[in-house]
C-alpha cells in the first residue's frame, strides 16, 4: 500500500514538474550578427521608402540611417519638420544599431517599470521609430524616424524603410 502511494506521489510530481517546465516562456532567439556596413545607396533606398510612407500621413518627419557602430551614413529631413527630431532620429537609429533591437523594446521595458534601461547607455532613446536594418540575415545598420506625435507612427514609417531592403 505504501509503495503504491509512494509510486503515485512520484508520478504526480513528475507530471506536475514537466507541466511546469512546459509552461516556461521560451527565450527569444538571439539577434542576427553584424554584417558589412550599410551603403549610402541602401540607406537612400530605405529612406526613400520611409519618406513615401510618411507622405501618406499629416506629419513632417526626419530620417536617419547609421552603420552598425552608430555612425551616421545618411540623413534626410522633410521641410518644416521640427529641429528636435534631428537628434532624436539619429539617437533612435544609433540605439537600434548598437543594441540590435527596435527602440520600441526599450519603451516597453520603461513602461513596464524597468526604468534601469535608461542607464544602459548615454543617448539611449526609448521610443518607437528605431529599427535595425537587416540584409542577407545580418544587421548592416539601423534607421531612425522622428517627428510624429507617437513612436508607434514613427515605427510604422521606419518599418517601410526596413522592408525596402528585404
Image (cartoon, rainbow, N blue to C red):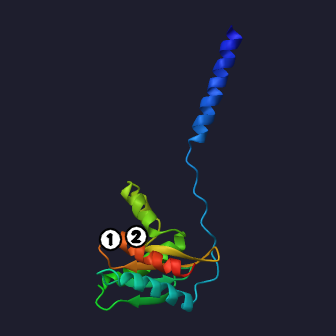
Q: CA distance from mark 1 to mark 2?
A: 8 Å
Quarter occupied by the C terminus: bottom right
Q: Is residue 43 left or right of residue 55?
A: right
Up/down of 7 relative to 109, above or below: above
Tell me if mark 2 has few (under 14), some (14-19) or many (20+) residues whose alpha carbon lies within 10 angstroms of its own.
many
Up/down of 55 relative to 110, above or below: below
Q: Position of residue 57 (x, y in %)?
A: 32, 80
Q: State which quadrant residue 117 falls in.
A: bottom left
Tell me if mark 1 has few (under 14), some (14-19) or many (20+) residues whose alpha carbon lies within 10 angstroms of its own.
few
Q: Is residue 119 visible?
A: no
Spot the residue most to the right: 3
Q: Residue at x 45, y 63 (%)?
A: 105
Q: State which quadrant residue 140 falls in.
A: bottom right
Q: Is residue 148 left or right of residue 3?
A: left
Q: Residue at x 68, y 7 (%)?
A: 1
| 13 or 94, nearer to the observer | 13
Spot the residue most to the top: 1
Q: Secondary structure at mark 1?
A: loop
| Residue 128: assigned label | 2
* Residues at discs 1 and 2 in contact (Cβ within 8 Å): yes
Identify residue for label 1. Answer: 150
Q: Secondary structure at mark 2?
A: loop
Up/down of 123 relative to 48, above or below: above
Q: Position of residue 45 (x, y in %)?
A: 51, 88
Q: Residue at x 43, y 81 (%)?
A: 90
Up/down of 4 relative to 13, above or below: above
Q: Earlier in the sequence, mark 1 or mark 2?
A: 2
Q: Is residue 69 left or right of residue 78?
A: right
Q: Is residue 74 visible?
A: yes
Amino acid at each position: 500500500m505504501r509503495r503504491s502511494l509512494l509510486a503515485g506521489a512520484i508520478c504526480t510530481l513528475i507530471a506536475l514538474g514537466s507541466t511546469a517546465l512546459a509552461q516556461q516562456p521560451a527565450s527569444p532567439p538571439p539577434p542576427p550578427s553584424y554584417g558589412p556596413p550599410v551603403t549610402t545607396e541602401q540607406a537612400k533606398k530605405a529612406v526613400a521608402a520611409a519618406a513615401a510612407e510618411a507622405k501618406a500621413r499629416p506629419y513632417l518627419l526626419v530620417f536617419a540611417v547609421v552603420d552598425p557602430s552608430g555612425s551616421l551614413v545618411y540623413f534626410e529631413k522633410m521641410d518644416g519638420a521640427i529641429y528636435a527630431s534631428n537628434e532624436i532620429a539619429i539617437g533612435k537609429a544609433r540605439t537600434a544599431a548598437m543594441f540590435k533591437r527596435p527602440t520600441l523594446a526599450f519603451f516597453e521595458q520603461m513602461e513596464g517599470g524597468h526604468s534601469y534601461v535608461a542607464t544602459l547607455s548615454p543617448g539611449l532613446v526609448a521610443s518607437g521609430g528605431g529599427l535595425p536594418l537587416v540584409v542577407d540575415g545580418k544587421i548592416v545598420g539601423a534607421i531612425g524616424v522622428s517627428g510624429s506625435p507617437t513612436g508607434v507612427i514613427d515605427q510604422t514609417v521606419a518599418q517601410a524603410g526596413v522592408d525596402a531592403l528585404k
